Image: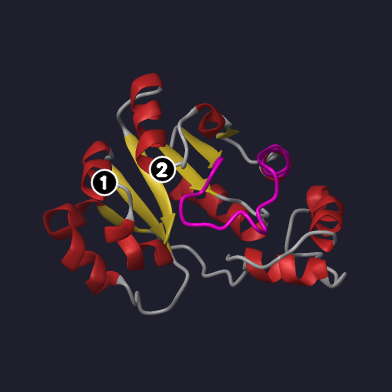
């Protein structure tokens, strides 16, 4: 079984790296593919760093993590970058034993995912990493997914309170972000967002 860890990574931060590292161990993945979103359907482009820059940041952030490969396949797929299209690409080109890694907050808007039941039908499991205490969206997920809820796997990982929005805001003000993003990308992230708008979402 292999994993897919997608996101805007705007910017990637240390929580992403910890989650990816531990997910490989906990889920016994053969490989985890980290997939930066080319054109996120639910994000404004106002504060979105260029895809090439985010891709480079992610590659540097995960460069020392074993069994992780960063791929740019969403730049070759139709936009917006729906997760279903990405999963279909992996199903065709890599294999069908897919574990899709998502943050707990994603469960709050499952019904807004593009053709979400079809998506869930194509994966072996949806691995959910925690962002809150007490699983506040569990009942909502059960209600929406019904029989497909059995595909949800709750990961026993530490809750790390790091926000890409907060990092962008701090960088815009010229405040330090050390300890929040990998050291290898810290200067580049700080420089980019200091000169860019940070309004427009997490």
Farthest top residue in view: 93
- What is the basis of the colouring in this image? secondary structure
Identify which residue, 141 or 18, lies in the foreground: 141
**10 Å crowding of disc 1: few (<14), some (14-19), many (20+):** few
User: What is the quadrant of the C terminus in the image?
Assistant: bottom right
| Residue visible at 42% across and 49% down in the picture | 101
Q: Is residue 33 above or below residue 106?
A: above
> From which residue to which does the magenta span run?
36-57
| In-image side of 190 versus 19 (left or right) | right
Mark-to-mark CA distance, 1 and 2: 9 Å
Q: Position of residue 98 (x, y in %)?
A: 34, 36
Identify which residue, 178 or 168, lies in the foreground: 168
Q: Which residue is mark 1?
A: 115
Of pointers 1 and 2, the one earlier in the residue sequence: 2
**10 Å crowding of disc 2: few (<14), some (14-19), many (20+):** many
| In-image side of 39 versus 115 (left or right) | right
| In-image side of 160 versus 51 (left or right) | left
Number of the label disc, if any, that sits on residue 129: none
Q: Which residue is mark 2?
A: 82
Quadrant hosting residue 143: bottom left
Secondary structure predominantly adopted by residues drawn in magenta: loop
| Residue visible at 67% across and 43% down in the picture | 58
Observer able to see residue 1:
no
| Residue visible at 42% across and 35% down in the picture | 86
Q: Position of residue 184 (x, y in %)?
A: 81, 47
């Amino acid at each position: 079984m292999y994993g897919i860890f997608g996101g805007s990574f705007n910017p990637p931060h240390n929580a992403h790296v910890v989650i990816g590292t531990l997910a490989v161990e906990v889920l016994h993945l053969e490989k985890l593919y980290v997939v930066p979103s080319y054109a996120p359907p639910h994000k404004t482009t106002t504060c979105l760093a260029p895809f090439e820059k985010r891709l480079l940041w992610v590659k540097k952030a995960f460069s020392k993590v074993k069994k992780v490969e960063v791929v740019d396949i969403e730049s070759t797929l139709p936009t917006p970058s729906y997760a279903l299209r990405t999963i279909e690409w992996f199903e065709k080109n890599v294999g069908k034993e897919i574990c899709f890694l998502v943050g707990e907050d994603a469960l709050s808007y499952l019904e807004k995912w593009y053709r979400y039941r079809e998506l869930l039908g194509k994966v072996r499991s949806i691995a959910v990493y925690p962002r809150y205490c007490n699983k506040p969206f569990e009942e909502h997920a059960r209600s929406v997914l019904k029989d497909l809820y059995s595909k949800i796997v709750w990961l026993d990982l530490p809750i790390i309170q790091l926000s890409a929005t907060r990092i962008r805001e701090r960088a815009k003000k010229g405040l330090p972000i050390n300890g929040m993003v990998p050291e290898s990308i810290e200067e580049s992230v700080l420089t980019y967002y200091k000169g860019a708008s940070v309004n427009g979402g997490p």
